[in-house]
Structures are given as structure tokens and as C-alpha cells.
Image (tube, rainbow, N blue to C red):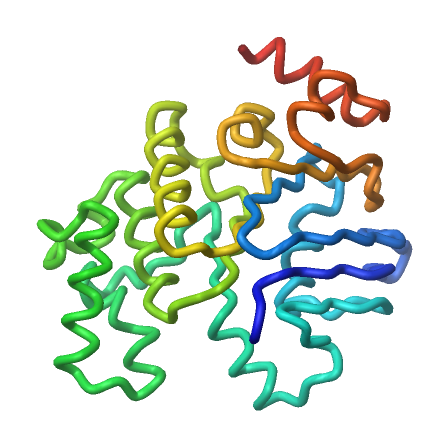
Amino acid sequence: METTSIEIQHLYKTYSSQNSQVKALRDVSLSIPEHEIFGVIGLSGAGKSTLVRCMNLLERPDSGKVILGGQDLLALNKKQLRLCRQKIGMIFQHFNLLEQLNVLANVCFPLEIRGIPARRRKEKAMDLLQKVGLADKAKAYPSQLSGGQKQRVAIARVLANDPGILLCDEATSALDPETTKTILDLLKTIHNTMGITIVIITHEMAVVRDICTKVAVLDDGAVQECGNVAEVFHAPKSKAARRLLLMGDKEE
């Protein structure tokens, strides 16, 4: 992956069941420059999670292109895709930590899968725990941590593979506002020090305002508008953006 830009071109994704079809994505195109902190915002059911899962092919789109770092993921074979995915980190709402492993072992886990020697992976994991402010929790287990601490461990684990792109799917939705701010501050620090391209998937206006430079508004599986955060929020052009803005004002 030479660069960390993201190009989404004419993406379609439909889910079919016995009785119905749901068009989760309808002709979605986005251009995310490298080193950007880019937000994708929309209400529940807008297609946000489907979009982010298509970005690393956890979900395969029906048609369109997903170009990360100049590579069309849909054109890669399984081995090539697996190698490419190592450079795409993903942070989830519910942390996805391995409960039977302590914090240090959780962060070591992706390095172990890659065959990194035990001493090197432990050194790297401790360095990452230091970066996220949890070196003192190395021997603790996930059940002993707060939600914010769990998310910090999840971030450290993702950083173990030295990703160029970080996808955050509702990464702060399970956290209170104060903890959310600390996680967003951590992501800003990671962005500033490591130059990682970050995509924030959220339904929270405050999150986009706090961390993102550009935002796409998703509704009914389609991009309704896209632009600089300040411009979109100050003078929204779409009904979807105006609805989100109204809801955000009420929450505040």
C-alpha cells in the first residue's frame, strides 16, 4: 500500500432475504485523501456500517470499486487481500477484545499471528500500551477495565500492525461524553504523530465536529452531501444533514 488514500467508486450493496431486499448502498462514491480525518455520518440504517465494512471487504459490494492506497481491493486474490488488510486497522463499538487474554496478550495477538518473535512482540506491545496510557494495566484482563480503557487496548492492538488506515465504526457510541473526548483526543494524537488516515463512522454530530476535517452525510444508502465539516454544519444543503443538525442541537 504505497499511499493511504481511499477511493470509493459507485458502490452498490443489496441484502436479500426470502421476502425482501434492502438496498444498503446505492451508488456511493467518496474520495478520502491520505492523512485525512474523514467522517461519515448518518442515522441508524443509513448504510454507514455496511460502507465501512466494504472498505476492507469484510462485506463484498455487489458492484463498484474500493481503491485503498492505489490498489483495487476487489481485484486482489486472497493472499494479496490478507496482506493489504494488515495495513487497514478497524476499531469497533464493542471493543472485540479476547476476554481470556490479559491486556498485554491482547495487543500481542496480531503480532503473534504474523510470526513476530515473542520478545519483539512484547516490547512493541508495551510501547503501544505506553502510547495509549495503559502500561500499568498490562497484566489486567478486559473484565477489569472500564469501557474507555477497553477501547484504548483495542486501539493499541490495531496499531500493532502499523496500519496506514484506521476505520472507526461507532468507536465511541458505547462511551460516556467525557470518555468519548479522551478517546477522540487519543485518535487526534495518533493522527498527528503517525500520519494515519482515519475514517470515523458515527451518528453523533459532536464527534464529527470535534475530530473530522471533512464529512459525508449518508442517508438511505446514498451520499446526500459531502464537504468541509464547518461548511456542511453551518449551511447544510440536504434534508438529511439538516435533520442530523437539528437532532444534534437538541442533544446539546
Height in image: 225 above or below 12? above
Residue at 71% of width from left, 69% of height from top?
67
Compared with 105, 239 (above or below) is above
For the point 76% across and 60% down, the residue is: 8
Between 188 and 111, the residue placed more toward the observer is 188
In front of the other: 39 or 93: 39
- How many marks overall? 0
At 60% from the left and 81% from the top, the residue drawn is 81
Figure quadrant of residue 57: bottom right
Residue 148 vs residue 141: left or right? right
Quarter of the image with the N terminus in it: bottom right
Q: Is residue 113 visible?
A: yes
Location of residue 34 in the rendering, given as x and y in whole percent from the top left corner: 59, 57
Expressed as whole percent of the image width and height from the top left, the position of residue 187 reads 40, 44
Q: In x, y percent, where is residue 75?
A: 75, 83
From the viewer's perspective, is 251 left or right of 25?
Answer: left
Q: Is residue 153 left or right of residue 236?
A: left
Q: Is residue 187 left or right of residue 2?
A: left
Q: In this view of the protein, can residue 12 be seen by the observer? A: no
- Answer with the quarter of the image where residue 213 lies: top right
